[in-house]
Every structure is written in structure tokens, then in C-alpha cells.
């Protein structure tokens, strides 16, 4: 009985659809709603047409699946904006309107009206597009209030090719008459006797506009003027860079006096070399921007060194800054205690008749600069005090630069092999001169 019930249930809608088809109307195969005006037809299944609601919900029936291809079938009576929209534009007319605006461009309403159809006038086309696509909800959602990256209007007085802003001279340089003569500088005109691209004026010096010039000659003369304007802009740009970075006082040696007056932090040799490498950025950044950029790089190096120090604290189980101070104090006490212990042991060795232990190095230069432990080390390594002091200085300097985040190239002497280097590094680490992570 259940099987027959299902068969009967399936047979009734088929007959119903046959009668509906005879009436010339189209119905959704899923919900049986009328879809004569708008329906979605499956391109892979036969006789599968869905209403917009069932299609958007992903309805599946029989062999039809939601990911199948589809085709929009419009009877011509479907409107995008609803029945209450002014003018009653159908979806077919809306599609033709969007094709026309892309093909003919905004403002060509007559061509657009001819493309849409004879039933629409240019005035109707303009009003419908402006009201629905610009001032309507679609335009409010798609067109931002402030449009970024607008094209600059080069015809305005402040930015045009021959605008006053291009030829307005900068304030004259504050230099003496002798310095003006040395530079060939003319303060009233803010010019130099020899400018950048000195022969730029030859492009327009012989130009003249004649009434019988043809289009090619006119365009050629305009190209000459354009090239001349570009050279003027480049000349002014170079003057602005020289004025912003005080290159003229630097050439005359006045910047040294200003640097002495303004106390600033001491710039290391590595920072000076980095500043020379970054000189090409001068033409893209103002002087203040470059100084801020360089100062931020210095702060970054300090922060990196501080982070490495905090990581070393964390590896030793320290999680608070108060504990770090106690840790450093305890570490120094421990190292001092080790050093005193070694000194005491060396003194006891001398008392036991080992006064001649340093006989091989005590007469060499630099012996008086060594501590008792360092004397023992140099004596055991058969290393002269002067060479040991040189190696010690290089290692400690490299360690300090690495802690500050400054890259360094260690250039140890050639007489120092791997064994000696390892013995000296272990000694400096145990003595507290360098940290263990550096060794």
C-alpha cells in the first residue's frame, strides 16, 4: 500500500503539469509556483525550471543538483526595482542600459536610448540611470563619498605647466658677498651662473607661432615647450633639495659650526657609513622625514639589543625586572668571588716556591696591565701580554657591538688559532667580561 501511495502521489503532479503546460504557463518543478515572467533553467537536466526563491535556496529534485549550470529565462515582464519603480523598466531593458553605458560612456544619452530601444527617450534614459544607479541605493553602496586617487587637474593655476608656483623663487641664501661670488649665486633672482642643464633654454629660444603652421608643426612646438617645462621642474626640484638639506652651507663649511652649537647624541662610525649608503633617499624624502627615519632605525637597533637581553633573562628563569637587578648583582658577586679565589690560590702557589712561574713573560711589555689570573693564562698559553691585550680588546668590542645591534666583522690576528681563541673566550666568559650567549 505505501508503494502504491507514492506512485499515485507522483502521478498526480505529472498530469497537473501537463495541464499547466497546455495553458501556456510555466511553473516551478519544486514548489509549483508560476514562473512565466522569470525562471532559472538547468542547462544539464531536461525540463528543470526553478523559481528565484527555490534557486537561491539550492533546491534539488531528481537528477538536478545545485551546482549545475543554469540559464536565466526572462519573459520580459520582470523588473529589477519592483513594480513600484518609476517607468516600469524590465530586466532586459536594464541589461541593454548597462551595455550602452559601457559602450557609449556617461552622457551620450541619445546613443544609449537608441541602443535600449525606440520605446525609451534620451531624457528617460538619463533620469532612470541617475535616479537608480547613482542616487539610488546601488549608487550609495558602490560610490564612496570621497574618491581616492583622483587625477590631478594640471590646468589649475597652482599646478599648471606655467603656473606661478613653478617660477616663484625661494628666499635668498644667507651668505656673504664673497661666498656669493665663489658660488656664482645671484640672490635677487635666486639663480646661479651655471644652472642644472644650462642649455635647456635652447629648446624654446627659436620658437615662434606662425599663422600658416600646420598641425604637425604646432604639436612639435608644444613638445618643445613641454620638454622645457620638465627641465625647469627638475632644476627647481634640485634647488629645493639643496635648500632643504643645507647643502650650500655644508659646501661652505658652515654646517660644522651649527653642529657644534646643537648638542646631539654622538653618531658612531657605523651610523655614518649607513647614512652615506642611504643618501639616494634624499631625493624622495624631506630632511625632517629622513632624520626621523634614521633615528627610528637607531631606536630599532637599541630595541633589538634590549630584546636579546630580556631573552637571556628569560632563559635564566627571570620574569620580572626587579629580579633582573638582583640577578646581575649576584652574578657580579659570584664572578668577583671566583676571581678572588683564583688570586688567593695563585698567591699560595707563590708562597710554595713558585715565584718563578711568570719568569718567561714578566719582562715583556704589557705585563703590568694583566691581573693575576690573566698572568696565569698567558703563561699557560705561552702568549705575550701585548698580544693577549690586543685579542681581549677585539673580542670585548665585538661583543658590545653585537649587544647594541650593530653588525661587526671580527678581525682577529693571524697568530690566534682555534684552541687559543676558545681558551681566551672561556676565560673572558668566566671572568664576566662577556656573556655566555656571546661566547
Image (tube, helix red, strand yellow):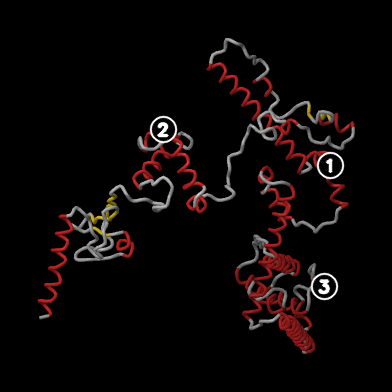
Q: Is residue 201 above or below residue 10?
A: above
State the SS at label 3.
Answer: helix
Q: Residue furthest top?
A: 212
Locate residue 235: give its quadrant: top right
Of callouts 3 and 2, the N-terminal one: 2
Q: Is residue 351 above or below residue 394?
A: below
Q: CA distance from mark 3 to mark 2?
A: 101 Å
Residue 222, image x and y in percent? 60, 22
Residue 369, image x and y in percent? 81, 71
Mark 2, residue position: 111
Q: Which mark is residue 253?
A: 1
State the SS at label 1.
Answer: loop
Residue 344, image x and y in percent? 78, 87
Q: CA distance from mark 1 to mark 2?
A: 70 Å
Residue 122 in view (yes/no): yes
State the SS at label 2.
Answer: helix
Mark 3, residue position: 368
Circles 3 and 2, Cβ within 8 Å, touching? The answer is: no
Q: Which mark is residue 428?
A: none
Q: Residues within 10 Å of mark 1 (few under 14, many from 20)?
A: few
> Which quadrant of the figure contains the N terminus?
bottom left
Residue 46 in view (yes/no): no
Amino acid at each position: 500500500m505505501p508503494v502504491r501511495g507514492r506512485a499515485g502521489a507522483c502521478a498526480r503532479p505529472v498530469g497537473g503539469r501537463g495541464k499547466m503546460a497546455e495553458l501556456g504557463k510555466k511553473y516551478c518543478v519544486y514548489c509549483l509556483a508560476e514562473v512565466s515572467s522569470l525562471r532559472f533553467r538547468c542547462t544539464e537536466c531536461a525540463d528543470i525550471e526553478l523559481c528565484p526563491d527555490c534557486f537561491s535556496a539550492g533546491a534539488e529534485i531528481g537528477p538536478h543538483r545545485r551546482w549545475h549550470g543554469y540559464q536565466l529565462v526572462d519573459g520580459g515582464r520582470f523588473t529589477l526595482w519592483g513594480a513600484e519603480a518609476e517607468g516600469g523598466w524590465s530586466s532586459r531593458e536594464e541589461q541593454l542600459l548597462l551595455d550602452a553605458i559601457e559602450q557609449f560612456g556617461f552622457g551620450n544619452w541619445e546613443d544609449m536610448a537608441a541602443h535600449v530601444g525606440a520605446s525609451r527617450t534620451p531624457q528617460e534614459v538619463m533620469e532612470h540611470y541617475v535616479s537608480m544607479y547613482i542616487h539610488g541605493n546601488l549608487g550609495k553602496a558602490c560610490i564612496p563619498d570621497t574618491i581616492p586617487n583622483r587625477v590631478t587637474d594640471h590646468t589649475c593655476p597652482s599646478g599648471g605647466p606655467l603656473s606661478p608656483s613653478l617660477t616663484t623663487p625661494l628666499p635668498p641664501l644667507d651668505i656673504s658677498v664673497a661666498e656669493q661670488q665663489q658660488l656664482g649665486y645671484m640672490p635677487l633672482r635666486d639663480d646661479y651662473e651655471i644652472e642644472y642643464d644650462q642649455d635647456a633654454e635652447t629648446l624654446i629660444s627659436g620658437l615662434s607661432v606662425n599663422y600658416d603652421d600646420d598641425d604637425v608643426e604646432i604639436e612639435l612646438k608644444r613638445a618643445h615647450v613641454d620638454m622645457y617645462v620638465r627641465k625647469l621642474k627638475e632644476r627647481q626640484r634640485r634647488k629645493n633639495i639643496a635648500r632643504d638639506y643645507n647643502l650650500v652651507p655644508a659646501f661652505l663649511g658652515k654646517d660644522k659650526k651649527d653642529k657644534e652649537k646643537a648638542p646631539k647624541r654622538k653618531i658612531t662610525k657605523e651610523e655614518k657609513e649607513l647614512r652615506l649608503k642611504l643618501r639616494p633617499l634624499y631625493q624622495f624624502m624631506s630632511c625632517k622625514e629622513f632624520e626621523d627615519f634614521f633615528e627610528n632605525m637607531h631606536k630599532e637597533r637599541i630595541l633589538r639589543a634590549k630584546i636579546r637581553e630580556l631573552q637571556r633573562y628569560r632563559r635564566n628563569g627571570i620574569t620580572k625586572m626587579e629580579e633582573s637587578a638582583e640577578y646581575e648583582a649576584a652574578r657580579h658577586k659570584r664572578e668577583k668571588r671566583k676571581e678572588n679565589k683564583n688570586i688567593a690560590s695563585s698567591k699560595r702557589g707563590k708562597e710554595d716556591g713558585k715565584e718563578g712561574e711568570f719568569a718567561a713573560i714578566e719582562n715583556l711589555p704589557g705585563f703590568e696591565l694583566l691581573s693575576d689570573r690573566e698572568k696565569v693564562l698567558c703563561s699557560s698559553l705561552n702568549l705575550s701580554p701585548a698580544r693577549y691585550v690586543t685579542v681581549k680588546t677585539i673580542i670585548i668590542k665585538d661583543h658590545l657591538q653585537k649587544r647594541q645591534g650593530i653588525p661587526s666583522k671580527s678581525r682577529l690576528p693571524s697568530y690566534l688559532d682555534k684552541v687559543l681563541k676558545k681558551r681566551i673566550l672561556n676565560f673572558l666568559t668566566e671572568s664576566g667580561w662577556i656573556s655566555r650567549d656571546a661566547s
